[in-house]
Image (cartoon, rainbow, N blue to C red):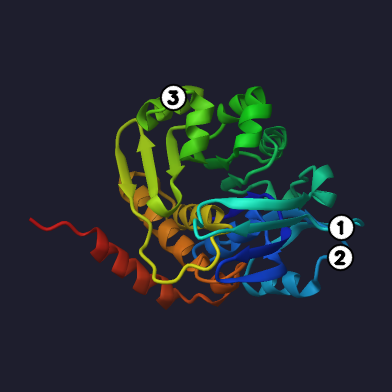
């Protein structure tokens, strides 16, 4: 089934203890699309500047991502530069240059408006609301957010959540949004705003899925080498939503598999800088790691 993502496309400069890259392909919509395209057809809406390298556009096309919703503006592409220490959970931002992304107003092409599944990546909740006005009748709507919008646009975020089924955020953001320290109580607050499911990302400590009817958690996939955590959360969301779009059903079993696929896709993403590892993935790579993850989670009496 069709999956629409609206989010950022960026050129990232990243330094970690294990290396660095300059102006590499990044952005929430890019990580999400590269992951979800392994399971479902993906429609991307975003904006770049005239300076955006054509090779990146070709990479997205080669990955099978529908980029008819990609707008090329006359200015410069969104750029972010950050550094990580040995604690790869925390990025230290050197600069953020929004450039054309500062004036981004998503326009959903007519051929995208029948999208059955919609993911609103981390952008201004006012823009996320506007996207929902432009799509016809999606069966599944999910959104991500961040501390900046929780602090500065809480009313808009709450308005958005009235029309959202699945809410993604990390544990700090969920506590900030709800005012609750306990994550179960925080999830109940989220449900009161509209969503039926809360996906709480916990970085290297895994993920928590909470609904009114069930709760489960998964650890992160154990790796020997992790080079760059940038985009891991967006990659998780891409694997999660891509799988759900592909199977066309939402129940506890499908959500468990979606979380598992999201987890292993994120583990691939951090093994290299930018989306390099995701671009090289094969179905066999994903299936093999999924089997290993199942063994990791197995509990015998």
Q: Quadrant of residue 181?
A: top left
Residue appearing at x 68%, y 28% in the figure = 152
Q: Classify mark 1: residues with Cα within 10 Å, few (<14), some (14-19) or many (20+).
A: some
- Callout 2–callout 3 Cβ contact below 8 Å: no
Expressed as whole percent of the image width and height from the top left, the position of residue 212 reads: 34, 30
Q: Furthest residue to the right?
A: 74
Q: Earlier in the sequence, mark 2 or mark 1?
A: 2
Residue 177 vs residue 112, the one in the foreground: 177
Expressed as whole percent of the image width and height from the top left, the position of residue 191 reads: 44, 27
Closer to the camera: disc 2 or disc 3? Answer: 3
- Callout 2–callout 1 Cβ contact below 8 Å: yes
Residue under pointer 3: 180
Residue 77 located left or right of residue 262: right
Residue under pointer 2: 51
Q: Which mark is residue 108?
A: none
What secondary structure is found at the residue carrying circle 2? loop
Expressed as whole percent of the image width and height from the top left, the position of residue 5 reads: 63, 51
Expressed as whole percent of the image width and height from the top left, the position of residue 246 reads: 47, 58
Residue 276 vs residue 84, the one in the foreground: 84
Q: Furthest residue to the left?
A: 301
Q: CA distance from mark 2 to mark 3?
A: 44 Å
- Callout 1–callout 3 Cβ contact below 8 Å: no
Q: Which mark is residue 76?
A: 1
Q: Classify mark 2: residues with Cα within 10 Å, few (<14), some (14-19) or many (20+).
A: few
Up-down: is 84 above or below 104?
A: below
Q: Classify mark 3: residues with Cα within 10 Å, few (<14), some (14-19) or many (20+).
A: some
Residue 171 vs residue 20, the one in the foreground: 20
Q: CA distance from mark 1 to mark 3?
A: 40 Å
Residue 50 located left or right of residue 253: right
What secondary structure is found at the residue carrying circle 1? loop
Q: CA distance from mark 2 to mark 1?
A: 6 Å
Residue appearing at x 69%, y 66% in the figure = 25
């Amino acid at each position: 089934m069709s999956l629409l993502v609206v989010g950022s496309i960026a050129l990232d400069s990243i330094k970690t203890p294990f290396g660095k890259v300059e102006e590499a392909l990044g952005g929430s919509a890019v990580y999400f699309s590269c992951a979800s395209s392994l399971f479902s057809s993906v429609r991307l809406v975003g904006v770049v500047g005239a300076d955006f390298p054509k090779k990146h556009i070709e990479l997205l096309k080669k990955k099978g991502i529908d980029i008819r919703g990609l707008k090329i503006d006359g200015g410069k592409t969104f750029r972010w530069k950050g550094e990580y220490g040995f604690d790869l959970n925390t990025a230290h931002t050197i600069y953020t240059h929004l450039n054309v992304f500062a004036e981004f107003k998503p326009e959903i092409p007519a051929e995208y408006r029948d999208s059955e599944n919609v993911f609103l990546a981390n952008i201004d909740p006012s823009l996320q609301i506007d996207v929902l006005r432009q799509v016809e009748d999606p069966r599944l709507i999910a959104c991500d957010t961040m501390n900046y919008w929780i602090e500065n646009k809480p009313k808009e975020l709450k308005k958005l959540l009235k029309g959202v089924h699945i809410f993604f955020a990390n544990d700090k953001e969920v506590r900030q949004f709800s005012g609750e320290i306990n994550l179960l109580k925080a999830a109940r607050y989220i449900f009161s705003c509209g969503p039926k499911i809360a996906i709480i990302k916990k970085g290297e400590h895994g993920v928590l899925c909470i609904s009114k009817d069930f709760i489960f958690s998964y650890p992160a996939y154990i790796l020997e080498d992790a080079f760059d955590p940038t985009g891991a959360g967006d990659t998780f969301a891409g694997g999660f939503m891509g799988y759900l779009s592909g199977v066309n059903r939402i129940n506890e079993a499908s959500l468990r598999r979606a979380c598992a696929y999201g987890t292993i896709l994120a583990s691939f993403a951090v093994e290299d800088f930018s989306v390099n590892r995701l671009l090289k993935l094969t179905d066999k790579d994903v299936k093999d790691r999924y089997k290993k993850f199942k063994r990791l989670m197995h509990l015998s009496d």
